[in-house]
Each structure stands twice: as structure tokens, then as C-alpha cells.
Image (cartoon, rainbow, N blue to C red):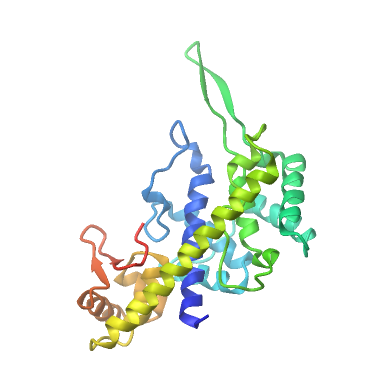
Amino acid sequence: MRGDVADGLALASLRRLWRVHVRDFAFENLGPDHDPGIEAAELTRSWYAAERRDFLSWIARRGPPPLARAARLALAAKGTAENYTEAFEPADRALARLDALLPARDPLAGLQGWLRQLREDEVCFLEGGSEEVLIGGRVFHRFAGRGSAWAASLAAAMRPHLFGLGAAPLALAGLAPRSLFAAEPESPLPALLADTIATAAYDLVTDLTDIHQAVTLGDTRLAALYASSQAPAAWRLIAALGPLTRAELARALVITRRTASQAATALEKAGLATLRHGDKALLPMGPARTD
């Protein structure tokens, strides 16, 4: 795998991990369905700045080298230093339990044993279902606080060698969704787990295809254009990680803001990116994912 494709895949995996994290994390249990909204799932533009810092900091400390580097790059782009928070202790516990079961000859059996441990020995991972609350003399039903499925998914994503992938620059996101921690799962755990693995693998192939196409497109369009020497790096960064402002590009690439602006202009001329008026973020165009 080309180095630029590998780096892009690590960044794209990080971006997808954040989307799964936003889906499963409590975020103060906002709204009746604990749904923070679609825009919050965009890693580089999410308004959950503190949670993003904690998420990236944990991966920078616990992830395999490619993912750890990607997390530090994202932190640099946002101008944020690494941080430690006790909120990620469930992820540490899930990771410790998974490591105790590795190496595993059968990944599916290993994950099943790990999930059983989390369900039986770590109460905080279980989903609470619904609960009754008394407000103003009346009884209401509402969703109970979410469990720590998000922590289990992050832990599993930090160990690609579970599937014989060694130190590959990727992460299988969403291996332990909330459905696996329901008090009464809708299907047997092995069947649910097989489905989540299949979904994660499909998402990974999608990310790899997108990044490969983006790199090829950048090579083609920028080769025919006199452009800033930083334009290819800027293109690969926004295509993989997501929309970034010129200031964020400058921090991530360790260049001046003027050089970042020149790179952004070159990408616009090449039809690879466009500048969004609201937040001045540079949006990737073409086959690269923009969701």
C-alpha cells in the first residue's frame, strides 16, 4: 500500500470512529433519544470540542502507531493539546480485558468471550432500557442513561491484529454497538457480532476505496496544474480527515497560514475543493467522502 494511501486510511478510520462514537456516547443524554444530531458526527467540525479532544487523546495514547499518529495530527490541526480524563476509564478496562484474551486463533470466538465478560462483570456497559420518573406528581417513561458500548467499540478498534491485520493503518469501527449490550438482545450474540463485523468490514472497504480514488484524482489534477508544493498534502488531508480551515491546515502541515492559503487556492483551481462561506472550511470535492 502506498504511504499516502496508508496515511489517508488511518485518518479516514479516525473519522469513522468518531461517527460511531457520537452515535453511541451519552453526551449528557441530550434529547428523548439521546441523539446529538448529524452535524456533531463530523470530526473536524463537530461542536463537541472537549469530547473530541478526549477521544483523540485516548487514541493517541492507546492506539497502534498509525492511528496514534493520525490522532495527534487531528489534535494539532485543531490546536489542542492531549488531555487525560477519567471518562475514558471504561475504554481502558475494555482494552485490558481484550488484551488478556489475545492472541486469539478464532477472532469471533475471542470477541464473544470478551463481550460475555463485559456483559457479566462490567455493569456500566449494559444498556438501561427505559425508566419511570416522577415529575410534578405525574409518572413519565424515558430512556435510561446509556451504557458504555462506545468504550467497547473503541477498545476493539485499537487491536487490528485481532483479525491478523498486524499494525495496519486502519480501524474496524463499531464492533460493539449498543445492541450487543441490551439486557435481552434481539438475536443471539454470535449472530449480532457476525453482523457488526460484516458492517465494519464493508465500511473499511468503502474508506479504502474512497482514499485510493482521492489520491489518484489528486495526482492527476495537480500534475497538470502549477500549484503550491503543499497542495497535494492539503488535498490528502481534507479528503481523509474532513473539512479544515486554512488555519487548521497550517497547523496540521506545520506551514505558514499564507502557504496554507496558497495550497487552498490551488485545490480550488484544480476543482478538488471549495471554500465554505460559513466557517471558511475547505471542503473536499470529487470521490472523497464529504458526509
Instruction: State whether residue 14 is above or below residue 26.
Output: below
Instruction: State whether residue 209 is above or below residue 222.
Output: above
Residue 257, image quadrant: bottom left
Instruction: State whether residue 4 is above or below residue 115.
Output: below
Q: Is residue 77 left or right of residue 275?
A: right
Horizontal and vertical percent position of residue 185: 65, 35
Horizontal and vertical percent position of residue 291: 36, 56
Residue 252, image quadrant: bottom left
Q: Could one spot residue 241 in this view of the protein?
A: yes
Q: Could one spot residue 87 in this view of the protein?
A: no
Q: Which residue is at 51% across, 76% downward?
A: 6
Q: Which residue is at 27% across, 81% downward?
A: 221
Q: Is residue 67 left or right of residue 124?
A: left
Q: Which residue is at 55% across, 61% downward?
A: 83
Horizontal and vertical percent position of residue 110: 75, 55
Instruction: State whether residue 71 is above or below residue 231.
Output: above
Q: Which residue is at 65% across, 70% downward?
A: 165
Q: Is residue 28 left or right of residue 195?
A: left
How many numbered marks appear? 0
Residue 201, image quadrant: bottom right
